[in-house]
Image (cartoon, rainbow, N blue to C red):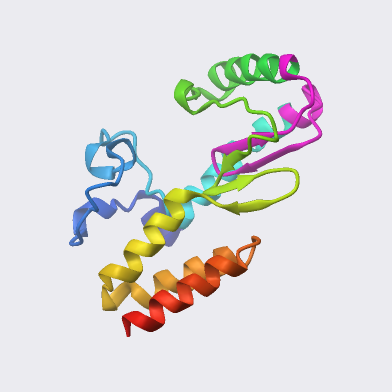
């Protein structure tokens, strides 16, 4: 029980010695979050708590709203529906549920209603009916990783990008990346 308490209540800000990238959004940084409202983004505890806490939202969406084509990773959700009006109503229903039942609120500027043909950016990838591919921001970050060549992090970061690319139709991008890494050596 002590280990669980230590893991959950550990404040990673107390022993942090790294640098925060200047492009890292302030609203996601632990250093700009009030002390009573923080949870490390990539920490295992935040993943577990996110899944447990939003489990009720999953049930609400599937059983009450009866949305069939729905996905969620942590606090990012995606819905596929042929009727735009249904999606607009779903947003209202989810907002009310989150506020009343889970004491959470939706980010207004993160709600996007697109047609599938336009593509939907979800978790760093564009999803279209005929193709799924990596978003431009992810590619930009990958190329920066190649050009900067922080030796301590380079291998781990590139393994992560290559693993991500393995889930998409990215053969040309993988070849281009391999050429960039090879010429950098």
Where's residue 107, x and y in %?
A: 46, 25
Q: In the image, is residue 80 above or below residue 165?
A: above
In the depicted view, which residue is nearer to us: 168 or 59? 168
Report the side of 173 relative to 88 (left or right).
left
Report the side of 49 relative to 169 (left or right).
left
Where's residue 27, x and y in %?
A: 31, 35
Q: Is residue 146 magenta?
A: no
Residue under the image location 49 percent in, 71 percent down: 176
Where's residue 22, x and y in %?
A: 22, 48
Name the quarter where the C terminus is drawn: bottom left
Q: In the image, is residue 74 above or below residue 110?
A: below
Residue under the image location 46 percent in, 71 percent down: 177
Where's residue 35, x and y in %?
A: 26, 36
In the depicted view, which residue is nearer to us: 37 or 106? 106
Residue under the image location 63 percent in, 19 percent down: 91
Splitting the image into 4 quarters, where does residue 171 fall? bottom right
Report the side of 71 relative to 108 (left or right).
right
Identify the magenta region.
Answer: 61-85
Residue under the image location 45 percent in, 78 percent down: 179
Report the side of 56 relative to 105 (left or right).
right
Q: Is residue 63 magenta?
A: yes
Q: In the image, is residue 83 above or below residue 183?
A: above
How many callouts does the rendering have? 0
Splitting the image into 4 quarters, where does residue 121 fall? top right
């Amino acid at each position: 029980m002590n280990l669980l308490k230590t893991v959950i209540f550990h404040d990673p800000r107390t022993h942090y010695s790294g640098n925060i990238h200047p492009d890292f959004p302030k609203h996601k940084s632990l250093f700009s979050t009030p002390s009573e409202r923080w949870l490390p983004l990539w920490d295992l505890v935040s993943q577990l708590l996110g899944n447990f806490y939003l489990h009720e939202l999953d049930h609400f969406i599937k059983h009450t709203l009866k949305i069939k084509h729905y996905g969620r990773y942590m606090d990012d959700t995606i819905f596929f529906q042929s009727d735009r009006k249904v999606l607009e109503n779903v947003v209202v229903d989810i907002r009310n549920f989150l506020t009343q039942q889970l004491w959470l609120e939706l980010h207004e500027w993160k709600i996007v209603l697109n047609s599938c043909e336009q593509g939907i950016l979800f978790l760093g990838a564009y999803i279209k009916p005929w193709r799924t591919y990596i978003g431009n921001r992810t590619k930009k970050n990958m190329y920066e990783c190649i050009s900067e060549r922080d030796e301590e992090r380079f291998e781990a970061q590139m393994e992560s990008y290559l693993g991500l690319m393995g889930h998409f139709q990215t053969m040309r991008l993988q070849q281009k990346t391999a050429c960039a890494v090879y010429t950098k050596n």
